[in-house]
Amino acid sequence: MKAKLRKFGIGLGIILLVLILGAGIWTVSKNSKVNHIIDTHRDPVITETVHTGPKRSVQQIMIGSLCTSYDNALQVLKNIKAAGYDGIELNDFMIQKTALVVKVLTQAAGMPVGNGGSLDWHALINESGLEVTGLHSNLGSIQADPKAVADLAKSYGTDTIIITGMYRFDYSSEEEVLDLARQLNEAGQALQKEGIQLLYHNHNCELQHVNDSQTAYDLIIENTDPAYVNFEFDSYWMADGGANVEAIMEKLGTRMKKWHVNDRGHVQAGPYMTPILTQDATELGNGNMDLEGLYEIAMANGVDNIVLETHQNWVNGDPIQSLQVSGQYMDKTFR
């Protein structure tokens, strides 16, 4: 028995050693890649933004994997500024200490939050010259303490709180979606008292049908009060779900305050083993979405902020290069 236990202990020790070494190698490799990307874009030439039209921002999720230290994060923000963007849209779970489970879930979804929660984002924003164009939070936090959420947003100089689709929520249930609309109205009213506007950001789950003629998104639009709830519309996820993006934007009208933009296509060169290609997020102008047409609708309805967001499939695996390419497209096309 002792011999068996000894062998088991040795075997377990070897497995743990392999796991530790593997994690160490992965961390070194990951950090080396991050440092290479940062070093490649050192000392950008920062020029005054000359574009006209709505402000341009980058969603913080794009840069989570690069924010391993204050210096690296500052360099990234300076690169965003140099690429012609006015601001950044922050996420509360990326600028504060975050629970391990949140880090694991975002990592699994391809959206690593990095080490941003331990950094001084007030100082970073101030030093970079960017402005904060909005703060993503969650419905539960707003319901628990709307003033605290509002104060956090105000501390970054923004009057906009955005929440995204609910996790572990049944978007195919008419009853539940109607209740969600009610809660959104209450949350928006509470934030309005603090001088903050509430926007709802969609993904593709809102395209679930709740009855014969309506989707969850239809219900959310029709049962929220424009005085308390408006929208940050993500055209990529609606296109991913097969919806008529133009029609939805027209339906939102002036309630569409911000536009989350991305392109969608297949960018790998052929020949292909199959004629069925996997579509994915890509830089603006590299995919097949009618971004010029969507831009015209957005401008006609007074959208005040275009927010770029991709969290994977970057050109050369480089989020900075990716946002630069998309920025160049906006300079050329979004006029």
Image: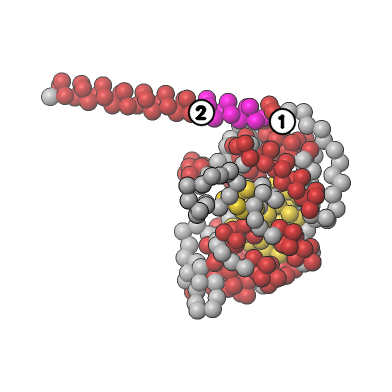
Instruction: Using residue 124 as the reference point, say whether residue 201 is left or right of it.
Output: left
Q: Which residue is mark 2?
A: 27
Q: Identify which residue, 292 or 21, lies in the foreground.
A: 292
- x, y percent for residue 303: 76, 61
Q: Which mark is residue 41?
A: 1
Q: Residue 289: where, in percent of width, then height?
A: 66, 58
Disc 2 secondary structure class: helix
View extreme (front): residue: 271
Asked where in the image residue 129 lies, by quadrant, the reply is top right
Q: Which residues are magenta?
A: 28-38
- Category of crowding for the residue at label 2, using alpha-carbon neighbours closer than 10 angstroms: few (below 14), some (14–19), many (at least 20): few
> Is 29 in the magenta?
yes
Residue 244: percent from left, percent from top = 62, 68
On screen, residue 26 above or below 232: above
Q: Quadrant of the C terminus?
A: bottom right
Q: Residue at x 47, y 69 (%)?
A: 172
Image quarter where the N terminus lies is: top left
Report the number of discs. Answer: 2
Seen from this angle, which residue lies furthest bottom?
212
Question: Foreground residue, 80 or 74?
Answer: 80
Determine if residue 294 is in view. yes
Question: Would you say residue 76 sits in the magenta stretch?
Answer: no
Residues at marks 1 and 2, CA–CA distance in whole angstroms: 21 Å
Image-quadrant location for residue 126: top right
Q: Residue at x 63, y 75 (%)?
A: 222
Q: Amino acid at mark 2?
A: Thr
Report whether residue 257 is seen.
Answer: no
